[in-house]
Image (spheres, rainbow, N blue to C red):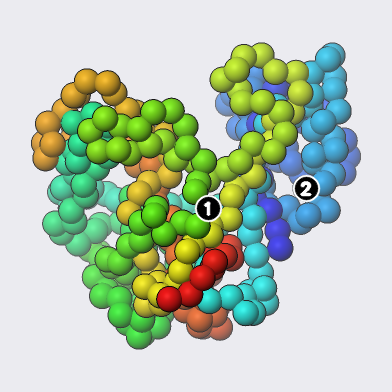
Amino acid sequence: MKFEINVWFRGTPKSVRDVLPADLKYVGEDLDDSTTQPGCDTLIVATPEQADRILEWGREKTDGLSNIKTLRYHDRFEIDELEGLKIVEILKQPQVDEAEIKNQKMALDVRWACEYCERLVVVQTDDLDLKITASESIQLTSNSEWVVARTLAPIFENYGHQLRPLKNNADYLQVIVSGSFDACQFAQPLRTFGNKCPGCNLQVTFRDDLIEGQPPYKGAIDEITIYRDRDISLASYGILTQGIRRSSFLIGNPRVYETPQHKIGSKIAYSKIGWLYYTLSPIFVAPAELVRELFHAGATGMDFRPVNIVSEC
């Protein structure tokens, strides 16, 4: 097991590097030096022992403030930890850049699904033209479409997935993820915030639990705040045994309004689409056997987390 950790510091990249102890210098290596204002962040992958050391130093105070403002933990697991699992959550590895959709305006028809909130309906109308900068054999686009090396195609086809070609790239194929699962299948609800949408009943949903400290929106905080992702617990796995499925709901922070803001079915301004994709994302689950086959075939670019099954049907 390992952790993907988002670390938010209080100082500038330079001031953070100056005070990091020798054994934690690696934590500041990827800080963005173009930032000169206080407050910077980084994303690292760490072992449990490294995570404990980061937390120990982060709790320490300088001039009355904790060295780290916020830590957010995301669990990741190794392939040998798949033993005995039936369903897993699959995720993009944090170091793998998303494939940019160059023809997004032409290939995706994006419309409002509700008058009162930022729920979307996305219909793909053409093959994707992608800018792929990473070399991994499994990647996600900026709109959470799955893209895989052509050599992995037979595995996905055996699990019932249709494959779609890409424009100007014969080495990768798009995996069509048509199956979905609903929030009502969660045995343990995810954390919600605020009021439900008056139009469609959507509610802001988060993956993480507050473990220590208090939320930043409550004002100035001198102690560290720690979040950790909540594991998925499904009430059953009966309909999740074929291929990859995506949640019918999105994780993130969509705006919800008290009065109608847009017309259902109307097209969304192209300038807004990127931000909406950035703030909202689905959860993907798949049979553990599919993930095993991909690892054994040498697939790279994905992580996974166990999914707890409360009952079977």
Give the farthest residue toward the right.
Answer: 22
- The image shows residue 151 at horizontal and vertical percentages of 40, 81
- Alpha carbon distance from label 2 to label 1: 26 Å
* Picture disc at residue 120: none
> Dot 2 lies on which element?
helix
| Residue found 67% across the figure and 77% down from its top | 80
Residue 189 in the image: x percent, y percent? 49, 48
Q: Position of residue 48 (x, y in %)?
A: 78, 54
- For the N terminus, the image quarter is bottom right
The residue type indicated by label 2 comes to Ala
Q: Residues within 10 Å of mark 1 (few under 14, many from 20)?
A: some
Q: Residues within 10 Å of mark 2 (few under 14, many from 20)?
A: some
The residue closer to the viewer here, 243 or 297, is 243
For marks 2 and 1 on the same chain, the one whose residue lies earlier in the sequence: 2
- Between 74 and 173, the residue placed more toward the observer is 74
Q: Amino acid at mark 1?
A: Gln
Q: Quadrant of residue 10?
A: top right
> Which residue: 56% across, 20% down?
217
Q: Is residue 205 left or right of residue 227?
A: left
Q: Which residue is mark 1?
A: 188
* Residue 270 seen: no
User: As drawn, is 127 to the left or to the right of 140?
Assistant: left
Q: Answer above or below: position of 270 versus 45.
A: above
Question: Residue 272, relative to residue 174: is it above or below?
Answer: above
Quadrant, the C terminus: bottom left
Q: Nearer the viewer, mark 2 or mark 1?
A: 1
Residue 247 at x, y = what percent? 37, 56
For mark 1, give the secondary structure: loop
Q: Which residue sits at x=61%, y=23%?
A: 216
Q: Residue at x 53, y 53 (%)?
A: 188
Give the residue pinned by disc 2: 51
